[in-house]
Image: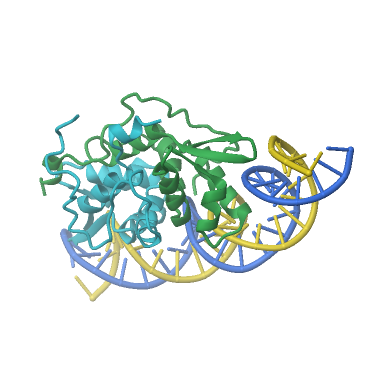
Chain colours: A cyan, B green, C yellow, D blue
Amino acid sequence: MSKQQASLPVVDLNADAPCCPPLAQRRVPAETAAVLAPAFKALGDPVRLQLMSMIASAEDGEACVCDLTPAFDLTGPTISHHLRTLREAGLVDAERRGTWVYYRARPQILRQLAALLSIEPATAAKV
Amino acid sequence: MSKQQASLPVVDLNADAPCCPPLAQRRVPAETAAVLAPAFKALGDPVRLQLMSMIASAEDGEACVCDLTPAFDLTGPTISHHLRTLREAGLVDAERRGTWVYYRARPQILRQLAALLSIEPATAAKV
DNA sequence: CGCCTGTCTTGACGTCTGTCGAATCAGACA
DNA sequence: TGTCTGATTCGACAGACGTCAAGACAGGCG
């Protein structure tokens, strides 16, 4: 078994959201589904998935809209709309500094989503 | 909405292969985003998220539609529609055995999605 | 001050999605 | 064979979504 997880199951999600034993371990209650589904939905668009990745993988932990926009064949308003969607899903934070607006990922919720999808090798191997 | 509607399973995510370095580690390329976004989208509905969980956490690794349907205040056709969405996203498999139809989760793609969202503590701690 | 650049909001348009009722298909069983 | 039950498909509808053009807002600079 992997030891990558030292103190695993008790995810330290300082969550403001009700959180998550793995989806495959215990049935997700309706309230949890209602809270987390919008986050998955926000990631359910290729453009937003790339935006999320560009922001999360940015060097300083933040990315400027001026860097994000030219990476797509889409207008500024459209990118802005997608960024707002990510923000409203709680996946990113925005901050204006002077002329430019910077977006920053929120690792907690990403961890929650990853935890929800995680599969214990043992569980998966059952069949 | 970016289109990627297929009436048939498109995703060949059968690979246990090293599909995806974490989203926060390397920028997700457009092709990967196009392939994985539909899976997130399929999980982006509370009903489907619960269905997915009920199937994945089922005792024998599979769940009968007859057990799934009465868990919601929705008609049979609606549940059937959601199950088809999950199937077309490559998240579940369906098999008819006699009178009943059983759905089974596909752990590979769940693992891929989890891997994509996973965050190295080191990476997350940067701030 | 006025202008310029960068970003967001508004309004509109076509498409997709979630839901239902009715019809249809697939097996089981008398 | 006929009929019954379980599941899917079909047709339709309201609402949400992705996209754009045009306008509005914010901050820097001459």
Residue name at image x 43 percent, y 29 percent: B13
Picture coordinates of residue B63, whole percent (x, y): 49, 43
Picture coordinates of residue A76, whole percent (x, y): 38, 53
Instruction: Pick whichever, A5 or B61, lies toward us.
Output: B61
Residue B52 visible in image: yes
Q: Which image quadrant is residue B91 in? A: top left
In the rendered image of this protein, does residue D30 appear above or below residue B49?
below
Picture coordinates of residue B53, whole percent (x, y): 40, 47
In the rendered image of this protein, does residue A51 appear above or below residue A125?
below
Q: How many marks?
A: 0
Instruction: Pick whichever, C17 or B105, lies toward us.
Output: B105
Residue A76 visible in image: no
In the rendered image of this protein, does residue A83 appear above or below residue A121?
below
Residue name at image x 11 percent, y 46 percent: B125
Instruction: Pick whichever, B27 or C26, lies toward us.
Output: C26
In the rendered image of this protein, does residue B16 appear above or below residue B93?
above
Q: Which image quadrant is residue B111 in? A: top left
Q: Is residue B121 left or right of residue B8?
A: left
Residue name at image x 41 percent, y 54 percent: A78
